[in-house]
Amino acid sequence: MNVRPPHPSPAHRLSVAPMMDWTDRHCRMFHRSLSRHTLLYTEMVTTGALLHGDVARHLDFHAGEHPVALQLGGSDPAALAVSARLGADWGYDEINLNVGCPSDRVQNGSFGACLMATPDVVAEGVAAMRGAVTIPVTVKHRIGIDDLDSYEHLHHFVATVAAAGCTTFIVHARKAILKGLTPKQNREIPPLRYEVVAQLKRDFPGLTVVLNGGVKSLEAAQEHLNFADGVMIGREAYQNPYLLARADSLIFGDSSAPPTRRKVLERYFPYVEEMLGRDVYISRLTRHTLGLFNGLPGARHWKRTLSERAHLPGAGMEVLLNAMSGVPDGVLDAGAEVEQPSALVS
């Protein structure tokens, strides 16, 4: 288990979205090597997995990940309360309820985005979790689902859940179409409606409203912070992770210089060595770093080396060092003035 810092302050001003199969503990430690302040989220963990599975496998994380939030999937208040207590005891800084995932598997479990149709059920779950823990309980949701896509319905949903004690809402600014679209299509086809999130903040000025959906840069995040309390970045932070290098200075006002890519790797290496000592395959640690040099000389060598060698039996730190050797020093040591410095790939 992990002990939270004495005065944890999870910063919703910028966060990286929970993404299944992506934001595992190794990804989060890599992202923490880029930004010290950005709030990180686990992949969604279902209440069933915690109540009937290997709790340590699902909840264990490194103390260096703070601030880090646990996202839960479920709808039964009692199960949510027990799961939230497990997360709090394990040392997480926040418990987040998933009311946004549109996948069939999640719908069949009666949680995720389909819960937007039953705000009272969400409110009961939030109330149960808040009764079980002292850390913040937040909700991540869509602006609507299927034909329940009016602003009036969204307003009622937020008001109902807020009455149960939730004060932070992370709003994916697209509705979800539960029948007929895949999860990938649900991230792309329903139009983004940032104005709906802005209206929510105007109507609920006392709540923390975080915008999610389609954010590709820190400059875009800054624009959204003109009307939202925070911004959550999803796949762009995974596919182009170096954008997080400027987050501490640009979004959080940290006076320290953004880390170079060499510094990012130097921060990550001790964790890699620690995990290798626990018999974790290095491919599980390097797959999250493939986009570190996107658009730069050396990117092809970096990706090819890691993709071809990290999965080989006995592969260790030498794979990372060899991958680095093909990246020019000027790229490794360049500052973070821009997020995508060049379209040139060697």
Image (spheres, grey):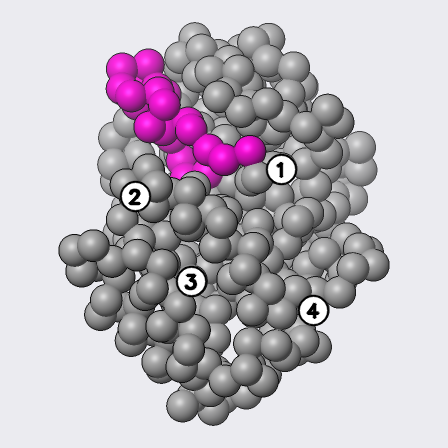
Q: 330 or 146, which is in the foreground? A: 330
What residue is shown at x 42% (from left), y 88% (from top)? 345
Between discs 2 and 1, the one toward the N terminus: 1
What is the distance, in whole Å, between disc 2 and disc 1 at their CAs?
A: 24 Å
Residue on which disc 1 sits = 67
Residue 49 occupies which quadrant of the picture? top left
Residue on which disc 2 sits = 280
Residue on which disc 4 sits = 219
Q: Secondary structure at mark 2?
A: loop
Between discs 3 and 4, the one toward the N terminus: 4
Position of the C terminus by quadrant? bottom left
User: What's the amino acid at mark 1?
Assistant: Pro
Q: Nearer the viewer, mark 3 or mark 4?
A: 3
Q: Is residue 281 visible?
A: yes
Which range of residues does the magenta coloring cover?
A: 42-63
Is 35 on the left or on the right of 48, as rendered?
A: right
What residue is shown at x 53% (from left), y 24% (from top)? 2
